[in-house]
Image (cartoon, coloured by chain):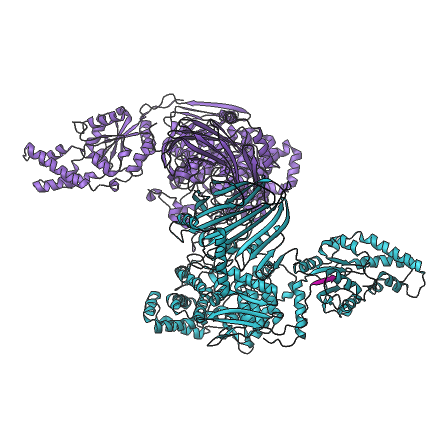
Chain colours: A cyan, B purple
Amino acid sequence: METKHDFIYTDWILIENQFQPNQLHARETIFTIGNGYLGTRGTFEESYPRALSATLIHGVYDDVPVVYTELANCPDWLPLVVIIDGERFRLDQGKILEYNRELDLHQGVLSRSLRWRSPTGKTIDISFERFASLADHHVLGQRCQLTTVDFHGLIEIQGSINGYPENKGFNHWEGLDQGKSDKGFWLHSRTRYSRIDIGMAAKMTISGVEAAMQVNTAPGYPSISATFFSEPRQTVTIDKIVTVFTSQDVVEPVSAAQEKIAQLPDYITLRDANQEAWAEVWQQSDIVIEGDSKAAFAVRYNLFQLLIAAPRDNNRVSIPAKTLSGFGYHGHIFWDTEIFILPFFTFTQPALARNLLTYRYHTLDGARRKAIHYGYQGAMYAWESAVTGDEVTPRWALPSDFYGEDVRIWCRDREIHISSVIPYAAWYYWRVTGDDEWLRDYGAEIILDTAIFWSSRVEFNPQTQRYEIRSVIGADEYHELVHNNTFTNRIVQWHLEKACIVGDWLRRSFPEKATELEKKLQLTDEIRNHWQEIINKIWIPYDPETGLLEQCEGFFQLDDINLADYEPRQKSMQAILGIEGANNHQVLKQPDVLMLLYLMRESAEFPYSKKILEVNWDYYAPRTDITYGSSLGPAIHAILAADLGKTQEAYERFMQAAMVDLEDIRGNSNEGIHGASAGGIWQAVVFGFGGIQFTDHQPAANPHLPPGWTRLKFKLYWRGKWHDFDLRSTSPPPHLPNIRGAIFDLDGVLTDTAEYHYQAWQKLADEEGLPFNRQANEALRGISRRASLMLMIGDRRYSDTQIQEMMERKNDYYVELIQNITPDNLLPGAVSLLDNLRQAGLKIALGSASKNARVVVEKLGISDKLDAIADGYSVQKPKPAPDLFLFAAQQLGLPPQQCVVFEDAAAGIDAALAAGMWAVGMGPPERVGNAHIVLPCLDGMTWGKLQGKFRDIALEKRAVITI
Amino acid sequence: METKHDFIYTDWILIENQFQPNQLHARETIFTIGNGYLGTRGTFEESYPRALSATLIHGVYDDVPVVYTELANCPDWLPLVVIIDGERFRLDQGKILEYNRELDLHQGVLSRSLRWRSPTGKTIDISFERFASLADHHVLGQRCQLTTVDFHGLIEIQGSINGYPENKGFNHWEGLDQGKSDKGFWLHSRTRYSRIDIGMAAKMTISGVEAAMQVNTAPGYPSISATFFSEPRQTVTIDKIVTVFTSQDVVEPVSAAQEKIAQLPDYITLRDANQEAWAEVWQQSDIVIEGDSKAAFAVRYNLFQLLIAAPRDNNRVSIPAKTLSGFGYHGHIFWDTEIFILPFFTFTQPALARNLLTYRYHTLDGARRKAIHYGYQGAMYAWESAVTGDEVTPRWALPSDFYGEDVRIWCRDREIHISSVIPYAAWYYWRVTGDDEWLRDYGAEIILDTAIFWSSRVEFNPQTQRYEIRSVIGADEYHELVHNNTFTNRIVQWHLEKACIVGDWLRRSFPEKATELEKKLQLTDEIRNHWQEIINKIWIPYDPETGLLEQCEGFFQLDDINLADYEPRQKSMQAILGIEGANNHQVLKQPDVLMLLYLMRESAEFPYSKKILEVNWDYYAPRTDITYGSSLGPAIHAILAADLGKTQEAYERFMQAAMVDLEDIRGNSNEGIHGASAGGIWQAVVFGFGGIQFTDHQPAANPHLPPGWTRLKFKLYWRGKWHDFDLRSTSPPPHLPNIRGAIFDLDGVLTDTAEYHYQAWQKLADEEGLPFNRQANEALRGISRRASLMLMIGDRRYSDTQIQEMMERKNDYYVELIQNITPDNLLPGAVSLLDNLRQAGLKIALGSASKNARVVVEKLGISDKLDAIADGYSVQKPKPAPDLFLFAAQQLGLPPQQCVVFEDAAAGIDAALAAGMWAVGMGPPERVGNAHIVLPCLDGMTWGKLQGKFRDIALEKRAVITI
């Protein structure tokens, strides 16, 4: 629990114990709460400069230029302002003495407790708590508790609804009316263009003190304030309850909000009901992981974010790409939902999965309008979809600079595989749940009308006598205009196969419905025959000799690329190469052929086979921009890597996906949760590590648990029954290090003082006429001052006094030189590794033979990053004796086997090994080859990467893991 | 003063005496106030649903998608909410018993007084007053006075600043801080992207009662409220003063606002200072018109709107196309300012003109960046300009529907004449003011660097051996891609001529400055020689035989058009023909060749001559969409028509421009004042009607006053001196009717009851075996029932009883038939003419021989549009006797010669003439040719048009008007 700078994860609770103003927006996303009706970002009750507060309600879209429509940020129910003797509580002023924010996934409650000292020195303990009730979706609860610490004073609390919410500046609402009520107020607003009404009501109660309450109705900003005089150590509790309805729920949303709030019980009763509802949900959807607490929490966190985003009572909306947690993609809905997110719901909350898929039924008319617009038949789904199902992908990325280029976005026109992947999702929902009624009433129409679209979209090439699909963007969006994308062609073929089956099934099982639907869709035998012909003759670019699938026509003729040549990098390959450059290279934004293999994996249909997977993985995985390309990639790669026994890579990709928001890996968590990644995580755990496969009668596990995982437990709903899985690894890897501390040598590891030592020695040698040069200096690495001097002197004779004097002289030169040290003298990667280790919870010590270590550390500005310092004064025996490192470990309070030493000298490595510690050698293997791990330098190194390397070592050593 | 439905104009005051919720946004524009620092739309203090409140400050732009930048609507200083025993004063609830809103142009004060009854029946008199001080631009004043009429009650007043202002939904501001102060509060906000800070402070005082005051600081919506108990007939006065500064004015805008407000005197003192400042401004800028009160007011109104929009202490901003009064064109600055608006300032407020032109100097760098972007040299001005001078014309008009077409806007690329018209304006400013210093320091650089641009832009055509300018949009924007636009080619030629002169002048007068500038602009002899060559060889498409200029290469080959074929219409010809259609026709959005003639008129340079003007007017004026094309057209046409002695047309165009906002003629006044039209009005009065021309020594008038104008008085500043003009028409036209009342026949004029009469007569005739048909019915028009029956009977013999019975029978049939009458039976144009006449202040009577007139009027739903009814019961003698109309005139309280009769029957016309009234005949001249004016129907008719016709009549009759 020593993490000072970042998250602490318990089983169920995310803890932030320091306010991070520079990560404000990402943290607002991460601390989003919700209940499937709405989502509310984790903005502070008292706000903060440039905060991006948002409450987004499913289906409440409004018009906006360029991107057509977006989820309208709704009136903000959070404002709760505390004013202490005229000073407003705010984190950008005064002093934060204590800070703790917790998101409890199991209870669905976000809380924060602080001790704050005002600019004039008044200290107060403030805690906040909030939840969006899962038990009653129209109820929102807030509690604030205040305890004055060291003053008597007048305290005012203003609880408000802010009727001026913004989507990055745009307020979608017109205030219609507002008014006072008993201990509260109400607000009535309407979206500007879509004319959706919202009614909200609020009431506030205060206990623990007598307070004067007053309602103020500033237009659009109604608030209720309580004013009281507070005594030190007196605790006052303020409960604010808010109700919310829209005209999509009820005819009179204002009355509904007012009536509901009048009937509600107290805060604690409401919070308990919410908690109970959450317990039920987790009952079905939880995944237990033991042996890897970070992964265990991260998986639950991702599932929580999906659960709060899934509509529970509404099948005319769906989960947007960024859930209800941010403004990214404007609340538009992509294939992310059906392919990445849906399986989690299908297998653990099938009623919610049904809602999500039924949205696609209700938007068929929009898909039909899109087909007509493009000159096709049937239903052509929108690449980005909102309330009507019409296409809402923007056409343009417009420059904000006066003379920039307009960039045409082609996804709406060309990324058409959406019209087969929705049927894919519908098919699998049916296969898993056996929900025949849904297929009859909704799914069949989706599957058949999109198939009709395809029969008007594919082209017959008379020269080659095959069907082709030209001018598309496949799954990989780096290639914006390709022909015969393998992914698209095969998924269309698959879709038409299934359309035939579903059509037959419907005619057999529900002949009347079949007749009705065929009439409605004008589905004739001719069309069905055409489907069959397309199935037979569509071109799949595949080489049966090698097993290699070509991503699209001509892909192998594009310029090849070696992604390693571009490392290290902080941006996508498209950002580096440009749009045209990416188009012209064999570089992928996300899996394409591999995505196809993933989709065909469960049923092992063509082209899926272990061999084909292997061949294509080897070709495409190294060419995929898995770090800064699409966030859709890592989870899929994790699953396929697990299939191929690449456990380490599987785990790395998995963690990359699992931590994408918690660690803001892509730097865009401010825009909202990566919903598809979260859904992919569930699939990676269950299908990848759990290795779940489906026989005719039941799902079965064929697990490949990552190293360290001792247990994996979850439930699946399959064909009407729940199936429990409790997978255990009985013998955890014996040598997997449990490293909790890091000890750093200074010279040559953290900084370049070796150079200053050399200069000081050289000066001394020159003065004394001793033979010395840079090469000779190499031999001095890691050994003490005296030993160094002895080496230089060699056979020459000096008195002890002379020797002492020379040592002091050399040291004087050195001390003089190191006065010039600044943080610039830190070696690349040193600071970020130190920070990263601390964030990971490791303790850090310095282990340097230098008597000047403290000065150097001071000059380098890293004192506060070290928990202990072992230096030239600490022990007698120099390296390679283990004493110095053992001393450091003792200072850290850790046993040697839980410490890792970073050293650049052979003597240092030997000392570390002698101490029974793990050793990381910096430099050439000839010098530091005895270390467990050898690195060229610290640059780019992270605790995650080191752990991976330790895992690999452990893996090589461990026996077969039995489950 | 009987106008019930619309504006009343006094010399200086615009009066609205009825609340018009359906014209809310246009009226907000019309009642804009300002002081050259900011403009504030006439939104109500208590607001209104969907109100578009705005305060726009010069130079406070912020980024926005598609159009790059816009004037950010600033925090709203208006909110002043009155709550009476819990009921909020609002015009959409309760009852408005009295309503009066006045804009006093001379004092610069907007006021409103109301008597309002709350939903629960409490009556209160409320008056508001506001001004933006012209004496101190950072000071805004508001006063509210309340007098309870019939109740005792608790009254609360909330005075606020709304920190959530919107540009059509977009809030450009981030709230930074706010706080309480003595009797007030302050607010600190910052624009989202341009990072401009605003500081505002407010204080509120109350007199006439003891009140409890409280400041509330709801985040972003600070307010101060006063609560008091009111007695009937007690008057309470609330004064709210606001100060405002931005970081463009001072370093610390919040402190500046706080310091200023602390030092201010009371409301009345501030208002007096404002009034005094306005008196001074009008001293120079007023125009007095006598004999045409509507025009007199309209001219002052337009000048007022220009005066409040002109920056007084800032030469880095300029007047946007829609001034500071609305969101149209986003506060972007066009050539409207230099060509249409500037002369008013040059001649009456030269210091302000200097500010406006200097803005173009400060934006030269932006113009240079634009030139570089397009691959040219020198300075290429932005078609739409904002703070930097970079091009901010949007590239696209993006559709809001999902599948609409993107429309590329080409003005930024092609409408390049801006780079010569700015030099044109600079040249004339210099010629008029003699401001050599300005030309040296600012103007010369503008004129020369744009000339350098042209030398890189024109192309030499080796085939024709001439210079050409290809691919432009000329002044006429209906043609989006033309070559060798005459307007552009000639203005460029003119510009290069003047550039040579200015260059020579500078070298002669200020050789050092000349050297410096030539070095800076890299202006060489080679370039100067190139200019001369272009001047000599640029192609001006002109036929010296006919004097006709061709608008552009190939214009005469386009499809010709007869605009009359499209009448009546309510939209532009581009809206009717489509963009391509307009491109392909000889139809103009605004004057182009005629605009060139206008610009060359003052100096009588080529191609201006009376003869060329005449020829080109005859060609182009009928092809110009002067009604729904550009609002830039009418004022220019008015001036040219005046030159050509087309007094009636000149006056019509003039009034079309003058009333464009006051009467919302184009239906887009909601977006802001038509600034260019307002500027054109001044030019039309001074240059057109005043006929001002400049000799070498002084300006001289050559007036063509419109009929009715007895006096035209104004001042001009020219070459260092003020010149007064007081032009009088000594003999007003003797027969110009002073019509103050209108009398309408019913049958055949307002409605079709003639048809019912016919049917009733026909039924009677059939029953009686009398010969009768539609043709015979024609003879019955306008004569009494008895006379009609007599005509039908002819020789046949009937008893008086029988005759009486037949008359009654016919009447019964008729009464039966007219039960079916509804407002749909009104003839086209009837209602709008009735309304229009009322708006113009005329009284209206019915003059019908029918005894059923009242029933019919009731059924038609026009009772409340009539001031009197003369019907079959009113007088004995039927038409053609004058009695009925004389009776009607008496009822209206008007002498016969002030009444006009609308009649469709010959007998009715005769009756009107016999009464000494003016007669308008409806129908064929054979029937109503005796009338003064003959119209086919009422459709499209307005009082303005009728007045024009009366003027024409008067004009034909009147002798020469001597001045």
| Residue B958 position in % (x across, y down) | 33, 24
Q: Which residue occupies the foreground of this view, B379 or B197? A: B197
| Residue A173 position in % (x across, y down) | 45, 47
| Residue A411 position in % (x across, y down) | 49, 60
Judge from the rendering whether residue B532 lies leftward or rightward of residue B127; answer left or right: right
Give the answer, above or below, for where A486 lies relative to B821.
below
Judge from the rendering whether residue B354 lies leftward or rightward of residue B229; answer left or right: right
All told, the count of numbered labels is: 0
| Residue B606 position in % (x across, y down) | 49, 36
Give the answer, above or below, for where B376 lies relative to B919.
below
- The reply to whether residue A66 is visible in this rendering is no
- The reply to whether residue A611 is visible in this rendering is yes
Magenta stretch holds residue B593:
no
* Residue A647 in which image quadrant: bottom right
Q: Which residue shows up at 66% across the image and 66% down it? A: A947
Q: Which residue occupies the foreground of this view, B488 or A644? A: A644
**Which residue of the protein is positioned furthest toward the top in this rendering?**
B730
* Residue A463 in which image quadrant: bottom left
Question: Which quarter of the figure is the N terminus of chain B placed in?
Answer: top left
Majority secondary structure in the magenta region: loop
Q: Which residue occupies the foreground of this view, A333 or B446? A: A333
Question: Which quarter of the figure is the C terminus of chain B placed in?
Answer: top left
Q: Which residues are magenta?
A: A730-745
Q: Which residue occupies the foreground of this view, A71 or A250? A: A250
